[in-house]
Amino acid sequence: MAPTDQELTEHLIRLIDIRLLDPLEILVGGHDAVDPLRAVIRERARSWATTIISGDDRAAIGVIMRAISTLYPGDGLFDPPIDWWRSPLGQAVARRVGHPTAESVSYTVAGAMLGITRQGVHDLVSRDKLARHPEGGVRSDSVRDRLLKEGTRRA
């Protein structure tokens, strides 16, 4: 199910608070220096959520990539845990770009992105409702397209 602007906004605020602002508060020794940033984040998160959910593709992808690279830094490719795909940000990312750094995903990841079981993904692939990747797994863009098609049917 696609997240609402409000659900995504609240999720982004929590993530930024936990991953960035709380550690910064510890580093600088108090909330007085960080509280003004919390206010800025609350305001900007609304704009980011709206852009991710309903902005044009280029702007949405830009916000998604900045958020992921900032909140989940690392030297390797972005490989979130399965539960991440069920979060408001994970669901919004799945709908806008599929997997942001992988052309193909495992049946398990595709299932998490779609909110179904691995077996359900296997069934969709068998019935040509999801595209198999030539090197294994499921095409990430196929998962995204299915999510978008389902959203259109429900609307």
Image (tube, helix red, strand yellow):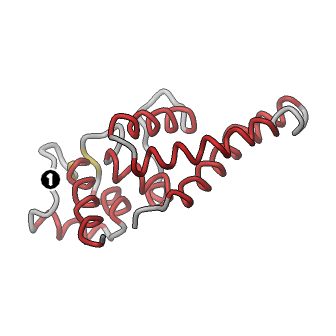
The foreground one among 77 and 58 is: 58
Left or right for 107, reference 36: left
What is the secondary structure assignment of the residue under circle 1?
loop
The foreground one among 95 and 59 is: 59
**Occupied quadrant, residue 122:** bottom left
Left or right for 23, reference 133: right
The foreground one among 75 and 143 is: 143
Percent position (x, y) of residue 111? 32, 63
Q: Look at label 1 and name its amino acid.
A: Arg
Percent position (x, y) of residue 49? 51, 48
How many residues crowd mark 1 within 10 Å: few (<14), some (14–19), many (20+)?
many
Q: Is residue 7 above or below residue 155?
A: above
Q: Is residue 65 above or below residue 127?
A: above
Question: How many numbered marks appear?
Answer: 1
Percent position (x, y) of residue 155? 30, 70
Residue visible at 27% across and 53% down in the picture: 144
Percent position (x, y) of residue 132? 14, 53
Q: Which residue is mark 1?
A: 132
Residue visible at 32% across and 44% down in the picture: 97
Q: Quadrant of the N terminus?
A: bottom left
